[in-house]
Image (cartoon, grey):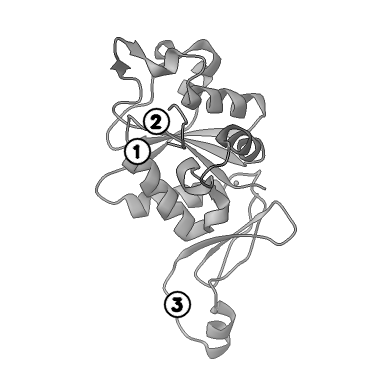
Amino acid sequence: MSGLFVNYRSTDEPFGARLIDRLLADRLGKDMVFLDNRTIPLGVAFEPVLLRRLRTSDALLVVIGRRWLRKVDGRRAIDDENDWVRREIVEALNCGILVIPVLMGEVTLPKREELPEDIRVISSHEYHLVGVKDPESDVDRLVERLAEQTWLRAVANAQPGAAEGEQEGAGRSSQITVRRVRNTGAMAIGTGASATSTRGQGLNQPR
C-alpha cells in the first residue's frame, strides 16, 4: 500500500483534515488517502492498522491549524510522548517518509523551539498552504506539487472515458487526475486527458 496519510489533531482543525481528505480522495481515490476515522472499520484495533498504513505511505500530511499547539488543562498535547500526532510524525521521520506540513488558513509553521526535540526538524520542512477562500484550488496545487517530486513515479493517465473522448476529438476541461497504477507503488498523474511524467479521531485514539 502507498499513498498519503493525513495527520491531524482533533482539538485543532478537524474540519480541515476532513476537507483535505475529501478533496484528495476525490482527486486520487479513497484508497490512496488515509484518514483514521474514515478508513479504520468499527470495532478494529486502530493502532496496528494505523501504523501499518503509515509505514507504507508515500507522505505524511501534517495538518496544522490555529490550535495545534494550544494548551489544554495547562499543558500541550504535543509535549506528551504518547500523543498520536507526535507519534505519527516521529514514526514517519524514522521510516524515511516525506513529512509535509499543511497549514490551514493564516497560521504559520511552528518554530523549532516550539516543538519537541524529536520532531523539530519539520520546522524547516517545505510546507503547503490551504486557505479558506479557495481550498479546492489549494489542494489541486498540492497534488501538482506532489507530482513534481522526484520520488513520485508518474505515468500518463486520463479520467474514466477519456480515451473515448480523445477518439471523438471532444474538448475536455482540465482536471487533475491521480490513480494507483496496477501492481505497482506508482501513481498516475494527469491533467484532463493528458499527463506529465515525474516521480508521491480514530475510535479511542487520543489526538
For the residue pair 201 and 148, the one nearer the viewer reads as 201
Label 1: which residue? 14
Residue type beneath disc 2: Arg
Q: Identify the residue at image location x=49%, y=70%.
A: 192
Can residue 140 be spotted in the picture?
no
Residue farthest front in this picture: 43
Q: Residues within 10 Å of mark 1 (few under 14, many from 20)?
A: some
**Measured Cα–Cα span from mark 1 to mark 2:** 7 Å
Circle 2: element type: loop
Which numbered dot is residue 110?
A: none
**Measured Cα–Cα span from mark 3 to mark 1:** 35 Å
Residue type beneath disc 1: Pro
Among the two numbered marks 1 and 2 on one chain, the one whose residue lies closer to the N terminus: 2
Measured from the top left, where is residue 117 in percent x and y?
52, 11
Would you say 126 lies left or right of 50 here? left
Please, is residue 134 above or below residue 58 in the view? below
Please, is residue 57 above or below residue 163 in the view? above
Measured from the top left, where is residue 142 in percent x and y?
45, 47
Location of residue 64 by image quarter: top left
Residues marked 1 and 2 touching at CB (< 8 Å): yes
Would you say 194 lies left or right of 76 here? right
Label 2: which residue? 9
Measured from the top left, where is residue 127 in percent x and y?
44, 34
Location of residue 182 by image quarter: bottom right
Residue type beneath disc 3: Arg
Between marks 2 and 3 in the image, the one whose residue lies nearer the viewer: 2
Label 3: which residue? 172
Can residue 159 be spotted in the picture?
yes
Circle 1: element type: helix
Measured from the top left, where is residue 25 in percent x and y?
48, 55
Between marks 3 and 1 in the image, the one whose residue lies nearer the viewer: 1
